């Protein structure tokens, strides 16, 4: 039962006017923002879906951006690698020419001048810098020069020439997320890209009686291997072979030393992470020395970089040694070219995969944006119609209020 009073009409009218104004305001906000949901309580289920869709769309856009950045990096890196391949092929042409034995020593010294310039260009490519100022072939050490050049006196030349090229980067790689919990490995290690031969290490210390005195951890080509107390050299060799590293270990039947060989053209990377197992075996100097130039003094090393091969070729030309050119040098050049072709193929496949990720993420972003639109966007035609109806009802309420305000309690008394 409602109590009839003079204020009843006024109070009811004011309440309905405020209700109409609230509905009009909400509709105006929806049309202004073109969003159906202004507050979570309006549609909790749809709002929950909308938040998840928007979060996923943000991640997909990041994945697409990552993949686009990778395609740019791969394309830039591949350009320098292609140019390096052309250099190596030209060097090989000169090697075939210089190995036939019909040229005089003066002719061969003249060829050495071109080989030296090609060597400089090869080093320049290896120290290539990207558009953001980082070195392309230094692994994750992108702020330092990837390869350091050592100048020195070379027999047959009156001016200092490049005597050696040392790698200054690392072998660490990055994992770039290109999809939900899916990553692409980015390997920019220059001592793999510009390496010519499989590297072999021949341990000079008899390890037949070696036994690990305590638990330790070693790193072989970036893969950490745990050594347990009591492990002998045969157990260590088996763990290296089973680790997944691109290295094969075996025991020398004559010297009893531990020999290591890479499975493809790359520089071997050895390090004692915990303990000193590799140092005890004489493979590295000590834990304080950083790889890759920490190999023990008693260890014999074979297998060099493309720079070593071109330097050896140039020096043989300066000496007039066509026999060395036709043997060791030409074989190393062929190995270096084959290795670079393999790296180019790998880089090209990574580029194509990155492009596929860009296309897929772009399509996924469109699909998710459509889901967001279905859940949260406003039906504009319906909203305008509803707003006109609400405005009409509001105007009618105002009109009726004007007529009701002149009534009083005496109008209800008979």
Image (cartoon, grey):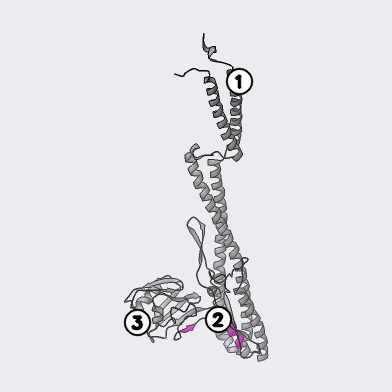
Circle nearer the N terminus (1, 3)? 3
Q: Nearer the viewer, residue 334 or 239?
A: 239
Q: Is residue 276 above or below residue 34?
A: below
Residue found at the far left of this picture: 230
Residue at position x 52%, y 12% in the image: 412
Residue 304, image x and y in percent? 53, 80
Q: Which mark is residue 210?
A: 3
User: Range of the magenta residues?
Assistant: 287-316
Q: Where is residue 228, by image quadrant?
A: bottom left
Tell me the quarter of the picture where residue 243 sits: bottom left
The Cα–Cα distance between marks 1 and 3, rounded to whole angstroms, is 106 Å
Q: Which residue is mark 1?
A: 402
In depth, the one of 251 and 154 nearer the eye is 154
Q: From the viewer's perspective, is the residue at label 3 or at label 2 nearer?
A: 3
Disc 3 packing (10 Å; few <14; some 14–19; many ≥20): some
Q: Is residue 298 magenta?
A: yes
């Amino acid at each position: 039962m409602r109590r009839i009073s003079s204020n009843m009409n006024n109070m009811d009218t004011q309440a309905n006017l405020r209700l109409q104004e609230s509905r009009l305001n909400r509709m105006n906000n929806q049309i202004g923002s073109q969003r159906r949901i202004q507050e979570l309580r309006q549609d909790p289920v749809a709002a929950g879906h909308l938040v998840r869709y928007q979060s996923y769309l943000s991640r997909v856009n990041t994945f697409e951006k990552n993949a686009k950045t990778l395609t740019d990096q791969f394309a830039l890196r591949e350009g320098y690698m292609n140019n390096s391949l052309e250099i190596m092929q030209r060097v090989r042409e000169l090697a075939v020419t210089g190995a036939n034995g019909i040229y005089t020593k003066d002719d061969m010294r003249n060829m050495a001048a071109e080989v030296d310039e090609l060597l400089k260009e090869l080093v320049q490519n290896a120290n290539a810098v990207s558009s953001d100022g980082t070195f392309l072939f230094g692994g994750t050490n992108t702020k330092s020069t990837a390869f350091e050049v050592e100048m020195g006196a070379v027999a047959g030349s009156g001016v200092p020439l490049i005597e050696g090229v040392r790698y200054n980067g690392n072998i660490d790689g990055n994992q770039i997320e290109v999809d939900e919990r899916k990553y692409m490995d980015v390997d920019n290690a220059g001592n793999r890209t510009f390496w010519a031969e499989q590297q072999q290490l021949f341990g000079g210390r008899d390890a037949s009686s070696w036994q690990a005195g305590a638990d330790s951890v070693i790193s072989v080509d970036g893969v950490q291997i745990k050594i347990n107390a009591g492990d002998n050299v045969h157990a260590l060799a088996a763990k290296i072979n089973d680790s997944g590293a691109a290295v094969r270990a075996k025991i020398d039947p004559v010297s009893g030393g531990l020999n290591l060989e890479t499975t493809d053209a790359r520089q071997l990377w050895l390090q004692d992470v915990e303990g000193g197992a590799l140092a005890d075996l004489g493979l590295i100097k000590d834990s304080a020395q950083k790889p890759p130039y920490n190999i023990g003094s008693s260890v014999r090393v074979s297998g060099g970089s493309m720079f070593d091969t071109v330097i050896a070729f140039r020096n043989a030309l300066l000496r007039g040694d066509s026999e060395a050119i036709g043997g060791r040098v030409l074989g190393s050049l062929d190995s270096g070219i084959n290795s670079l072709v393999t790296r180019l193929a790998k880089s090209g496949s990574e580029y194509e995969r990155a492009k596929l990720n860009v296309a897929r993420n772009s399509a996924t972003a469109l699909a998710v944006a459509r889901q967001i639109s279905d859940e949260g966007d406003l039906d504009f035609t319906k909203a305008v119609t509803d707003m006109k109806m609400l405005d009409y009802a509001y105007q009618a309420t105002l009109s009726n209020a004007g007529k009701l305000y002149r009534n009083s309690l005496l109008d209800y008394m008979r």
